[in-house]
Amino acid sequence: MATDILMPKMGESVQEGTILRWLKKPGDTVERDEIIAEI
């Protein structure tokens, strides 16, 4: 099931980011507040 994920604010002037590395694979379970990617 697809789920929207909100990126935490990183400062007043930061509007977007680039995912450097995914820490989860498709099908992995994700818990609330778990880190899933490096920005």
Image: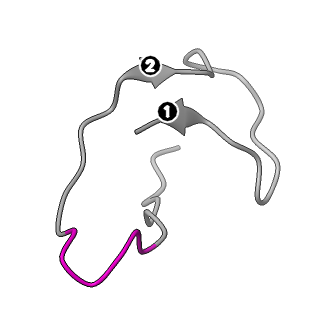
Q: In this view, does 39 lie above or below 8?
A: above
- Image height of 29 relative to 13, above or below: above
**Is 39 displayed left or right of 32 in the figure?**
left
Task: Give me the disc on residue 38.
Answer: 1
What amino acid is found at the position of numbered circle 1 in the picture? Answer: Glu
First to last magenta residue range = 9-14
Q: Name the residue under label 2.
A: 21
**What residue is drawn where x is 64% and y is 20%?**
27
Q: How far apart, in angstroms, are the residues tagged by discs 1 and 2?
A: 5 Å
Q: Where is residue 20 in the image (x, y as percent from the top left)?
A: 36, 23
Q: Position of residue 15 (x, y in %)?
A: 17, 69
Circle 1: element type: strand
User: What residue do we see at 19% from left, 58% from top?
Assistant: 16
**Residue 35 in the figure: left or right of residue 13:** right
- Residue placed furthest toward the bottom: 12
Q: Residue at 22%, 68% (x, y): give it.
A: 14
Task: Please tell me how crowded label 2 is: few (under 14), some (14-19), or many (20+) other residues with Cα within 10 Å.
Answer: few
Q: Judging from the image, what secondary structure is the residue with disc 2 in?
A: strand
